[in-house]
Image: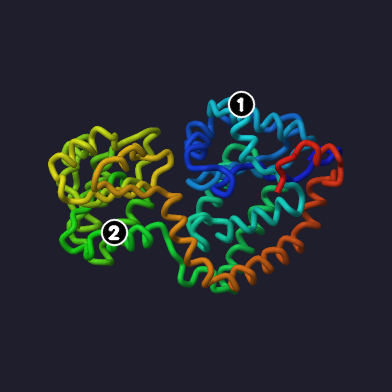
Amino acid sequence: MSPAGGIFFHLGASHHTAPLALREKLALTPEKTAALGARLGVAGELREWAVLSTCNRVEFYGVAGSPAAIDHLQTEFCALLECSPADFARAARRTFGLEALRHLLVVAAGLDSQMLGETEIFGQMKDAYAAALHRGTAGPVLNRAFQKTFQAAKFVRTHTAITEGQVSVASVAVDLALKIFGGLRTVRVLLLGAGEIGEKTARAFQSRGAEAITVASRRLERAMELAQALAAAALPFEHAPGRLAEFDIVLCATSAPGVVLTHDAVAAAMRRRPARPLFCIDLALPRDVEPTVTRLPNVFLYNLDDLAKIAEENRAARENEVTRAQALVAEKAGALWPRMEQLCGSKTVDDKRWSAAAPNAG
């Protein structure tokens, strides 16, 4: 670390500030993350950085020697994704020092997630840290921050009931399907995408009675592998739009860069099944299903934000646990910060330049 010191920062946008359409633009694929790494590296005033990109957030954590370094990071990020700097600025939040560290812990513990208490974020944060290590952009500050954050997040989950009665995207989707169809035993389900989220959702449907599940993936071998694990059928991905009319529920969870199910494909399917509802659950970011399908009679479409709004109703029952968990996070962050501050160097958040550079901080 430079003798001049630096400040620990967080810069990003999440479901709290960025609508789904903007989060689609901000999503970082591994290829785009690599390109960003090539643009930024670790040079000048940007001392360390890591990026966490999920369906609900894109956030940078790092150490900067000046506000200009964070401005440069934001500029390069927007340029790479061809995102309007003004759009990102409206949704972006910056925090510094202890506040940034508290935010990191809150996110890792699942307290800032759309699905309160969800555990996927913990693994995603571990992946973000591992990527920073591999890239060479994690130094002594991020090493300390992430390693202690993982310990603190585990402690919070173990010493509170924050994960009890947890509502997941999959469970909300199943409950909605039951309201539409009454039961799932005779319902035909198509899963597009054979990743972790799709598999979890398919298993949730199976646990509530669904028996007829078909898996389609761009990699047929992966579709066949998951289909075997689920005792389901496999379908070549390119055949899915043409056979859409055969299914009652479509679970979309691909990593495709754009729309997979178009309005025209769904309309053609509904002409062959006009009296039977088609329930589409879009778990992807960017979205897999063209939003205009909701104009079609008997078509029901729910995306990530729709499911999160429904899940929010469950939050009230666990509000006491949220308060306890937040208190534990504040305690852990406060204990960790003095050593973090030493590692960062001499800069403090009291410097007026940092405050002036972050009108959206919060």
Could you classify mark 2 by the number of other residues whose Cα lies within 10 Å: few (under 14), some (14-19), or many (20 or more)? many
Q: How many numbered discs sit on the rendered protein?
A: 2
> Which label lies toward us, 2 or 1?
2
Residue at image point 65% right, 65% down: 326
Could you classify mark 1 by the number of other residues whose Cα lies within 10 Å: few (under 14), some (14-19), or many (20 or more)? few
Position of 212 with respect to 102 (left or right) is left
Position of 146 with respect to 227 (left or right) is right
Q: Secondary structure at mark 1?
A: helix
Along the viewing direction, whichever of 43 and 247 lies nearer the viewer = 247
Task: Relative to 94, say whether 40 is above or below.
Answer: above
Residue at image point 29% right, 37% down: 261
What type is the residue that disc 2 sits on? Ala
Return the mark for residue 177: 2
Residue identifier under label 1: 39
Residue 317 seen in the current view: yes
Q: Position of residue 104 (x, y in %)?
A: 65, 53
Is the image coloured rainbow, by chain, by secondary structure, or in one colour? rainbow
Disc 2 and disc 1: Cα gap in Å? Answer: 45 Å
Residue 225 seen in the current view: no
Quadrant housing the N terminus = top right
Q: Position of residue 274 (x, y in %)?
A: 16, 45
Q: Position of residue 330 (x, y in %)?
A: 71, 64
Q: Secondary structure at mark 2?
A: helix
Residue at image point 18% right, 40% down: 269
What type is the residue that disc 1 sits on? Arg
Task: Relative to 337, say whether 91 is above or below.
Answer: above
Q: Position of residue 245 (x, y in %)?
A: 16, 43
Return the mark for residue 305: none
Task: Relative to 341, say whether 176 is above or below.
Answer: below
Position of 156 with respect to 3 (left or right) is left
